[in-house]
Amino acid sequence: MWLYAARRIVLTIPILLGVTIICFALVQIAPGDPIQNLLSPTSSAADAARLRAAYGLDQPLPIQYFIWLGRVLVGNLGTSIANNMPVAGEVMHAFSNTVVIALISVALAFVLSMFFGVIAACRSGQLADKLITAVAVFGISVPPFWLAVTLVIVFAVNLSLLPATGMGANGSGNFSYFQWTSLKFAVMPITALALPPLGIMTRTTRSAIAEILNQDFIQTLRAKGLSEASVVVHAIRNIMPQAIAMLGLQLGYLIGGSVLVETVFTWPGTGYLLNKAVQTRDIPLLQGTILVLATAFVLINLFVDLMQSLIDPRIKRS
Amino acid sequence: MSDLMAAQKAAADPRDRGGPAQPMLIVDGFKKYFPIRAGLLNRQVAEVKAVDDVSFFVMKGETLGIVGESGCGKSTLARLLMHLIRKDAGQLILDGDLVGEASGILLDGLRRSLQMVFQDSSSSLNPRLPIEQSIAYGPRVQGASRQVARQQARSLMEKVGLNPNLFGQRYAHELSGGQKQRVNIARALALDPRLLILDEAVSALDKSVEAQVLNLLGDIKKELRLTYIFISHDLHVVRYISDRVMVMYLGQLVEIGPVDTIYEDPKHPYTQALLACRLNMDPHERVDAAPLAGDPPSPVIPPPGCRFHTRCPYVEDVCKTTSPGLGDVLRLSPKQHLAACHMVHPRSGHSSAPAFAA
Amino acid sequence: MSEIVADSFRQPVRDPVSLVPVRSYWGSVWQRLRFDYVTLFCLAVILLIVASAVFAPWLAPMDPDKSSMAYRLRPVGYRNFMLGTDEQGRDMLSRLLYGGRISLTMGILPVMLSTLIGGLFGVVAGYYGGKINMAIMRTMDVFFAFPSILLAIAISGSLGGGITNQLLTLTVVLIPPLCRVAETATTQVRTMDFVDAARSTGASTMSILFTHVLINVISPVLVYASTLVSVSIILASGLSFLGLGVSPPTADWGLMLATLRQSIYVQPLVSAIPGIAILVTSIAFNLVSDGLRQAMDVRA
C-alpha cells in the first residue's frame, strides 16, 4: 500500500506541471499584447522594447515559462491589472470563502444522496424510486446558475425569507457560520451548489447499491436469515470506497465550478473573483485563480485516492 | 506409424515446395520473454520466460499435440508461430523457406499457409459482424472480389456444417458454442492454409459437441490435406487426435515423441505425473492423491538446474545444478522419443541413469 | 454502422429453413427503444425544439432584435407578446426561438467535433498502446485536472467572448472525456481474439481499425457523446451568462438569462423562461441518452 501511495504522489507531479503549462498558456492565447496595456499612448517603440526586456517577455517561450514557474513556486502569482494588488493574496482570501461553502454543500449532498440512493435502490421500480430518480435527473440537468436565480426569485423576491446576495453587512470580515444573521446569506448559495452533486451522487449510489444487492453474496446473507436492514448495511459498506471517490470528485467540481453560482449571489469567493477577472479582462488574476483552483482540484483527488486506498481492502493489501 | 507414412505420401501436393520429406514447419530456438514492470518509475525489474528456447518440427500431414499445464507457454508459442507477437529469438522455416527474413518468404505467404483457430470464447468473433462477413474478411483482405469472397464464405460454411442461408446473416451472440467454433474453423480455412494451429479449440465445448467438432476437424484434415498443431490441456483429446505429442513445462519442451510411446511409456517424471492425473475409466484404478503437488514455480525465477526438480519425486543433487538437455530435436526422425531428464541420459550423474545410450 | 456494412452482403433470405428472423444490431436496439415511452417522448421533445429553432424565421411572430422602450418587461400573455417582453421590450417568444438556434448549436456542434477529434486520439492511443498511448493519455490527464466549467472559463476568459471562441472552448473541454472513453473501449477490443484473427489474415492496420475496431468502439462512444450534449448546453449557457458568448443583440438562452437577471424583481416569470428552455432541453437530452445506453448495452 505504501508503494501505491508513493506512486500516486509521484504521478501527481507531472500532472501539476501540466496544469502550470496550461495556466501559462492562458496568457499566450489571450489576444492583445500585455505590454501595450502598460504603456502610455505617447511612448515609443524603444520604450516598449525596454519594458518587454524588463518583464522578460523578449525571451523565448520556454524560458519565460520557467521564469514564471519559479515565481509561482515562491507564491508570487503576479499583480492584478485592475487594482495593482498581488493576485496571490486576493485569491487566497476568496479561496477560503469558496472552500467553506463547497465543503458544506458537498457534505450535505453526500449524506442526502446516500439516504435517497439507498431508498431508491431498495424500492427499485416503485414510486419512491421514480420520484428520487426524477429529482436526480433534475439536479443533473439544471443549469446551476438558473437554479440560483430561481431560488432568489422564490425565497428573496416572493417570500422575502432570505437575503438575495452578498455575505451580510460587514462582508466576510466577521462572518460566522454559527449565527443565523450571517448564515442566512449562505443558505441559498449552499442549496444551489448542493443540488447538482446531489443528483449525480444519488444516481451513482442507487446504481451501485442496486448492483450489489443483485450479487450472490447478498443472496447468501439473506439465505442465512439476516434482516433486510443489515443486508443493506453490508451493501453500503461495499460501496464506501466508490462513494468516497465520488465525494472527492464532487468536492473538486464544486470548488472549481462554483463560478456561476457565486456570481449570482455575489458571494466573495473564487468564482466571483473569476467573474470579475473575465469582465475586466484581468488576465493575471484569471490565471492565478485558475492555477490555485486546478491545483486544489488535483490535490483533493490525490487525497481522496489515498483515503480510498486506506478504506478499500483490495488496495490496502497490495 | 503407418498412418504417418500414409499421410506423408498423401502430401504430394501442388502447393508443396520442399518435397514430401521436408517438414511443414521447423521451429528453431524460439524465445519470448515478457518484461515485468514495477516500482515507482515502472522500470523493468524482471522477465517472464514464457517460451524459452523451444525447437521442434511438424511433418506434412501429421497432427502434433502440445500439452502442458496452464501457464506453460503453449498459447504464447501459438501466437509466436502466427507472428501475432514478436519473438525475441529463433527461426521459423515453413516448407523449406525461412519466414520473415530478407531471403525467405514474406509474412504474407506465411499468413496464407498458417492459420489459427482460437479458443471458443466471446471474444473470438466480432460481435458486430454477421458471421458470413467474418469468414469472408480474410479473402477480401487478400484481394478477392466481394462476390467471390462471399461465395467462398458460403461454401466454407457448408463445409463446416452450417447452413449459409440460415446462419450467414447471424451474429456471434446468436450462435451456440459449437456453432461459433465451426465459424472459427471456417474463418481459418478461408485463406486455404496448409497448417492449422488449434489453440484449445475444443476445450470450452460440451463433451458431445466436442466430439462432433473433433470429427469435423478429422474430416477436413483428410479432405484438405492439412497439417495440425493441436494445443490442449485435455490429454484424452490429444491422444485421440495426435500423431506425435510434445510436452511443455515452464516455457520449455520436456518430452517429445509419437503419441503411443509417450502415453504408454512416458520417460519424463512430469509427463508421468500429467498422465497419472487423467481420470481413469476403471474406478478401481483411480487415484485419490494428486500426483502433482502444488502450483508450478514462478516462470519469472525458474528453479536452477532442471526446472521440474522442485516437484519431482526422483530429484537428486545433479537435478538441482545441471539443466538436462533434450537432444537435438531437429536432427532426429519423427519416430524418436526424447525426454529432457537426467534419468534418461547416460552418465548424467543421476543414480537411475542408464550406463549406455539405449 | 453495421447496417451499412451489412447491406453490401445482404440478400433477401427467402429460404424456407430460415425461421429465425435475422436482425441487425441497430435493428435490435430499435426494437428495445420502441417500447421505451419516456425516451420516445423525450426524443419527440428534442425534435420539436430542434424544429422550432430551425424554422425560427417562419415561426417567430416578431423581429427578435427589435426593441421598444414603450413595451419593456411586459408579463406573459400581454397583448400579442405570448411570453412577454424582455428588458428592452423585445418579444420573448421570438428571442427564445432564435436563441434556440445558437444554444442548440452550442450543445451539438462541439460534441460532434470533440467526438471526432477525441475519438480519433482515443482509438489511436488504444490501438497502438505503448508510448503513443502514454503520450496521448497523459496529456489528457492534465486536462482532467480541471473541472470542466473551470477549464471552459479559463480558455474562454483568455480568448475572449464571441461565438467562435465559445465553440472552440467547448470542443477543447469535451475532447478529454471522449478520448478516454474511446481509449478504454479500444483497448478492450484490441485484446480480443477476433482482432488477432484479423491480423493473422494479413490485413492492414487501417482495414482492421475500420472493419473490426471502430464498429465495436462506436456505440459506447456515441452513447457517451449523447450524454455530453446536455453538459455542453449547460456549459455554453454558463459561458454566455458570464458574457463569454455571443455579443449582446443576438439572442441566446444563456445570455437572455444573464440580462434578464436584473429584472427578476419586476417580472420573475419572464426572467425564468430562458432557464426553463435550457432545463427542458437538457433533461430531454439526458433522458434520451439514458434510454440509448440501456437499449445499446444489452449485447446478447
Image (cartoon, grey):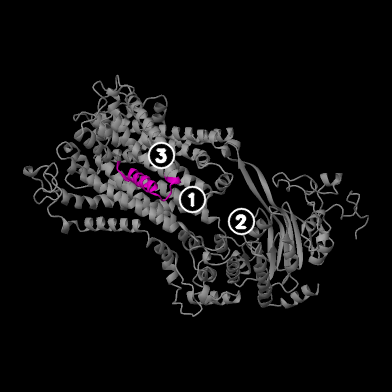
In the image, the segment drawn in magenta is A120-143
Q: CA distance from mark 2 to mark 1?
A: 21 Å
Residue of label 3: A113
What residue is at 22 percent from the left and 57 percent from the top?
C52
Type of amino acid at the residue the image marks with label 3: Ser
Tag 1 and tag 3, C-beta contact below 8 Å? no
Type of amino acid at the residue the image marks with label 1: Thr
What residue is at 26 percent from the left and 47 percent from the top?
C278
- Which mark identifies residue B85? 2
Image coordinates of residue B120 in percent, x first then y, are 60, 62
Q: CA distance from mark 2 to mark 3?
A: 48 Å
Image coordinates of residue A71 in percent, x first then y, are 39, 26
Viewer-closest of B287 and A66? B287
Of tags 2 and 1, the one toward the viewer is: 1
Check if residue A125 falls in the magenta segment: yes
Viewer-closest of C257 and A76? C257
Of tags 2 and 3, the one toward the viewer is: 3
Chain designation of label 1: C
Of helix, strand and loop, which mostly describes the magenta segment?
helix
Q: How many marks?
A: 3
Chain designation of label 3: A
What residue is at 10 percent from the left and 52 percent from the top?
C80
Chain designation of label 2: B
Secondary structure found at label 2:
loop
Image coordinates of residue A42 in percent, x first then y, are 18, 29
- The answer to which image quadrant residue C149 occupies is top left
Secondary structure found at label 1:
helix
Using residue B158 as the reference point, say whether residue C71 is left or right of it. Answer: left
Residue of label 1: C184
Viewer-closest of C267 and A8? C267
Image coordinates of residue A234 in percent, x first then y, are 53, 40
Q: Is residue A60 visible?
A: no
